[in-house]
Amino acid sequence: MTITDCASCADERAAGAAFCEACGNKLGEIEAQPADPDPAGTDPAGPDQKRAACPHCGTAGSVGADGYCENCGLLAARPRDHIEIDLGVAAAVTDRGQRHHRNEDAMWLAGRPGHIDAVVSDGVSSSFDPDVASQTAADAAGSSLAGEPGAEGDQLADAIRTAGVAVAGLAADGDPRRAVSNPACTVVAATVRDQLVDVGWVGDSRAYWLPAEGPAEQLTEDDSWATHAIALGADPQMALRDPKAHAITAWLGADAGPVRPRTAGFTVTAPGHLVLCSDGLWNYLPDPARFADTVRDALGGKSLLDAARQLATFANAAGGADNITVVLIPVAPTEYKE
């Protein structure tokens, strides 16, 4: 029998694995071809990072950069459990959270002052290899944004469609179980060109505009059951309390049908911050005013990276029920820049 999760510790299994990476127990007969669970080759912790103690055998300083204990050989932490990007002019953090055994979020952040590209992707946990889907989407969309732009206004949509093709292709590649429950994910992407901000999305990962004062403005509209029910006239509070409220109605994957990204853009007239995040953060901050207060508190007097870290810590302290990803990008019109 082929099993997906470890019967001993319930850890999610990497595609094609014969033994559980977390507890070392045999998983059962494997009918699948081995597949790389991290095709992007995510760079693990750098050589200067302090080594952690192994949670399995307790040996201090035994966890290597690949996340495995050099004493007992078990997986102590996956390289994607916590990743940080600091560009100085923008910063991002993704974190596994408290409840999931692996991080199924992924992100892309690149650029220079006045020219930033950002992507956040959230794997659909009910699909097979959602962590592969999200990393594939983030890398494909990010690489597309970094290339030559197409027609004006099409760059984000083209990048998301490129990501959709890449994610859909996973169903026919590697582990054959992907064809049964194909890898799937959501995506939100943004470009900042001086004071011009554009966002594009499929699913329920979000983008917000955070002004200097007042509530945050949600720039995206969730592709979710609740959003569609409310648009059709359902009572908002009842729709949001429905068990189907957060079920997504659009995603990237082989079973998603044609990818139809939605886009929005505006010109910044006063300094503020563009915030991209997965639902691992915004689920704890559904009120726009509280979202704004929490992000401003994190930003107060801190570096962008420290602020992103604080928001991940906030979500973990609130329960960490999902993976957490947040990107912070300050944007100001030319007349406000030094």
Image: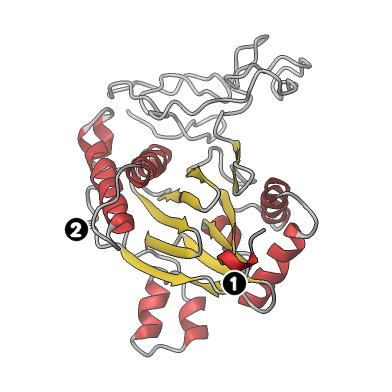
Residue wearing tag 1? 286
Residue positioned 40% across, 54% down in the render: 187
SS type, badge 1: loop
Q: Please give left or right for residue 102 compared with residue 133 in the image.
A: right
Q: Position of residue 62 (x, y in %)?
A: 71, 14
Residue positioned 37% across, 90% down in the render: 233
Q: Which mark is residue 258?
A: 2
Q: Position of residue 166 (x, y in %)?
A: 26, 41
Q: Is residue 40 above or below residue 181?
A: above
Q: Position of residue 84 (x, y in %)?
A: 61, 39
Residue positioned 56% across, 38% down in the render: 101
Q: Is residue 300 above or below residue 266?
A: above
In-front residue for pair 14/30: 14
Q: Amino acid at mark 2?
A: Pro
Q: Amino acid at mark 1?
A: Pro
SS type, badge 2: loop
Q: Position of residue 224 (x, y in %)?
A: 39, 69
